[in-house]
Amino acid sequence: MSIASIVEELARQGWCVIPVFLSATETTALRAECLAAHTAGAFHAAAVGRGEAAGVRAEVRGDQILWLDDSHAGPAARVVLERYEALRQGVNQALFLGLFDLEAHFAVYPPGGGYQRHLDRFRDDDHRSLTVVLYLNQDWREEDGGLLRFWPEADGEPFDILPAGGTLVTFLSDRYWHEVLPSRRQRLSLTGWFRRR
């Protein structure tokens, strides 16, 4: 799916699922970078909340993360960051969201790990505007769990998205509730948020 098609879907409904944002080869390379850093002990337990209210609460969120930026992104991550920059520019040109930068991290969920229903914008901070979640999982099946449960309407019926490698899910950060269902095997993603000033 082209950047223009993604922007069109975001304009129409505020969210989009792109099954082949990365090729199998690109996904394998990015997964290898993620796993190498995880094996090296570069990750830490993810927290919920921010500021003084931030804390690790494994019963709410069970992943480990590694924040990513240009200074320590490997070649495969740089490819994704370049595509994200093209997406940022396309969204700004068409939807005037004023997206300024990207904060992103690798996330590794161990078996049994999940993340309870939440929005991606803090109550006291409206900088996060557009969420991007790129899955790095190989040969993922529904019985592996770890599905992304997504609510198109806050009080409506959700649907589940398979976290298959190469799939990108993007949505307006302040509008859509979502949840990571418990996984039965290690689950990998590169998750980010385009922010406005």
Image (cartoon, rainbow, N blue to C red):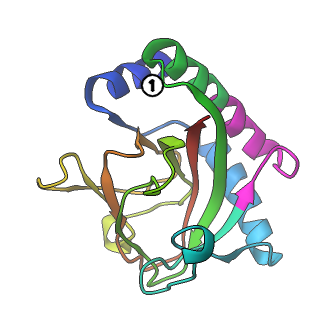
Q: Is residue 6 left or right of residue 14?
A: right
Q: Is residue 194 left or right of residue 29?
A: left
The structure residue drawn at horizontal position 45% and vertical position 52%, both measured from the top left corner, is 121
- Residue 154 rendering spot, x and y as whole percentages: 19, 53
Callout count: 1
Q: Is residue 91 above or below residue 142?
A: above
Task: State the extent of the magenta-drawn residues as a range.
Answer: 67-84
Q: Is residue 33 above or below residue 26?
A: below
Would you say residue 83 sits in the magenta stretch? yes
Q: Residue furthest right?
A: 71
Q: Residue furthest top?
A: 93
Quarter of the image where the N terminus is located? top left
Mark 1 secondary-structure assignment: loop
The structure residue drawn at horizontal position 79% and vertical position 67%, both measured from the top left corner, is 36
Residue under label 1: 1
Identify which residue, 185 or 128, lies in the foreground.
128
Would you say residue 113 sits in the magenta stretch? no
Quarter of the image where the C terminus is located? top right
**Mark 1 is on which residue type?**
Met
The structure residue drawn at horizontal position 74% and vertical position 45%, both measured from the top left corner, is 77
- Residue 17 rendering spot, x and y as whole percentages: 37, 39
